[in-house]
Image: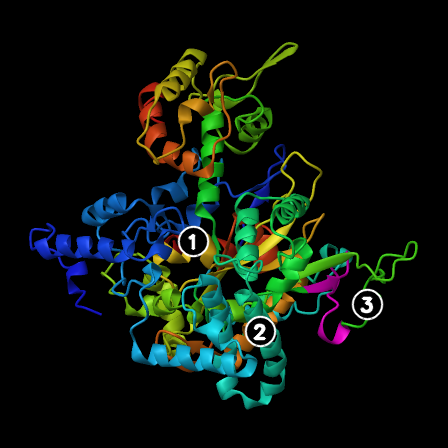
Amino acid sequence: MENNKAFTLANGGKASFFYCHCHFLPLHHRYRKNRKDFFVGRVEKDVTSPRLSGEELHDVVSEYDDIVFGLQSGKQKFLGFGLTHNWVKRSIFFKLPYWKTNLLRHNLDVMHIEKNMFENIFNTVMDVKGKAKDNIKARLDIALYCNRKNMELVYDESRVAKPRASFVLEKNAQLLVYKWLKSLRFPDGHVSNISRLVNIEDYKLYGMKSHDCHVLMQTLIPLAFRDLLPKGI
Amino acid sequence: MDDRSWMYRDSPQGLRRMDYCNGVQGFINFVTSIPINFTGGGIRCPCRKCENKKYLHPDVVMMHLLHKGFMENYQCWYAHEEVFVSESERRMEETVVGSISSANNVHEAANDNTNPYRNMVIDAMRMNQGNGSQCPIIEEELNADAARFFDLLKDSDEPLWDGCTNHSKLSAVAQVFTIKSDHRLSEAGYDKIIEWARSILPEGNRLKENFYAAKSMMKPLGLGYQKINMCPNFCMLYYLKNAEMTECITCGHSRYKPRTGRGKNLVAYKKLRYFPITPRLQRLFMSPRTAEHMTWHQAHHAVDEVMVHPSNGEAWKCFNSVHPHFSAESRNVHLGLCTDGFNPSGSFAAPYSCWPVILTVYNLPPGMCMRPEFMFLSTVIPGPRSPGQNIDVCLRPLIDELAQLWSSGALIYDISRKQNFLMRAALMWTTMIFQLTECFLVGARMGNSHVHTAWKTTRHSR
């Protein structure tokens, strides 16, 4: 989109919205002028771009109607794609005469998102190998965009060391959490038997359903991490 | 019917009154006096939790009723073989049954009111009757339908073997079908069991010999689906004006697989399964148990600031105010759509992504509208690759039908009010996981602000 500040991470290779939400803040909010803690040296002056109503959106999207479906559909690009807009087609739902008047056209599966969030948070804090988001590439990106010296990689002659982040639990603390989860018992029908999902040898949770993630996220994680992690987190 | 007001009346302290306890005792006596109530191994429990779905011992049922109370709207004990009391209802039953009997001389059999499988057939028949009474144009079709239907009715009353009293041809097949789907029996397994069952049944029994024959017999009941051939590259559907083509317009891929051997039938590369939504919505209005709930979204009393149903949400109210013609008829149907890809043979099997598209009826109360029986599968998009942004091609039959349901509607018989009405339907929104929303349905790639507005507004729809 025109006013989009999303960018691709140089090392992680993923689209990132880091710090983009700052334009939702009030104009004089101190985070907007904070050059130190988020993006190094960036001051956010933009305000939120106006939200298009259904009718306006319909007018915009109608331009992108003549698309040929099939193998080639991903390769067709409308003029200005990636620069001024990101549209690839006019959705077939706009063929319904009332679709443009709908206030809420698409919903997101909140349970699914919560599951993803839980997995990311839990695996990062418990430092699960291969699943944690706090990896080498992330550290390289932090060095590139932020001013967080304690998170940067330490180059020591022939070796590279990754300093432990403050939000990652130590091994004995992890063991404590897993043992606690193993011993938990719940009322009937509240959640699946979590103690069966814990594998202490592997330091992992197996076979979590999205509802289990919901319960852990809402009630158990705050309890577990409040005492084990430092106060600022 | 005697006075049933005791069923939903409690003393001011929330305790059971004496007349409630006596009433429950009367209910149990009534139910146990009719032997057919014991067919499921016990009697149906009409308590708030079991809702006539469980078969339990009468003593347990009594305890449930004293403890939990009756389920809602159960003044007429229809699931316990109490005959319908409403006059107009009875009249209609008679006309339907009468017309069938006069046409086919199955009068004696049709008068037998105790066979649930015959009621199932009559339910299906009412749908056709309801349409026929106001649409003389389709009478020709109706007759053909009716003929098939009468065959089915005859089937339903023919005993399984001469002298069999408790099973008809149809009831036997319907029960085996239930077992098949409950226990996920394969087709081959079904055939083997039927083969065995036929061998122990008396000579000259009428049990259908295999799954295919049984399915052909059940087919006239309705709720079928269409198979629409499609280009394996998701370019187009062989649908409507393209129905006769044999090659894809865009990529030139052949529609059918090359013939091998002596096979006569042409086999398409890819088939889309489309389940028309109108007959399924019709069924909701056909059954007295669901028809009354179809207006729940307007009838219920909303407590301010409490979101119990999407109809309390902003989007719903806005839709109704923009389309007053639509909202004036509370029986008009509000639908939601959701889809996701999955691998039917498990996540560790060969990669194959099948996309079911499911419609939800939001007219129903919250306890019902998220139940699997009220979620209608409308399209099955075959794999092995996911359709990606070509999903528009596959959704075309659905969107065409939805557009038609919006503009002209469908004539439907509503059993709760005993009248025909023109039902219209609107798709309120879609629900799916984050990544899909942006690239498949909204029509934009990563970084689109409208996706994020959807994200913010999600909370009040759930």
Q: Residues within 10 Å of mark 2 (few under 14, many from 20)?
A: many
The amino acid type of the residue labelled 2 equals Phe
Q: Position of residue B104 (x, y in %)?
A: 56, 79
Q: Residue furthest right?
A: B261
Place residue B366 in its image quadrant: bottom left
Kindly report the distance in space between the C-alpha atoms of the residues bearing marks 1 and 3: 41 Å
Which residue position holds label 2? Answer: B149
In the displayed structure, would residue B343 be above or below residue B34? above
Does the magenta segment cover residue B238?
yes
- Going from N to C along the chain, the mark reached first, 1 or 2, is 2
Q: Is residue B352 left or right of residue A177?
A: right
Q: Secondary structure at mark 1?
A: loop
**Dot label at residue B371:** 1
Q: Secondary structure at mark 2?
A: helix
The amino acid type of the residue labelled 3 equals Ile
In the displayed structure, would residue B170 be above or below residue B139? above
Q: Position of residue B419 (x, y in %)?
A: 39, 81
Q: Residue furthest top?
A: A157
Q: Position of residue B441 (x, y in %)?
A: 58, 58
Kindly report the distance in space between the C-alpha atoms of the residues bearing marks 3 and 2: 41 Å
Do the CB atoms of the residues marked 3 and 2 lie less than 8 Å apart? no
Q: Secondary structure at mark 3?
A: loop
Give the residues in magenta. B227-242
Q: Residue furthest left?
A: B12
1 vs 2, front mark: 2
Which residue position holds label 3? Answer: B249
Q: Is residue B158 left or right of residue A83?
A: left
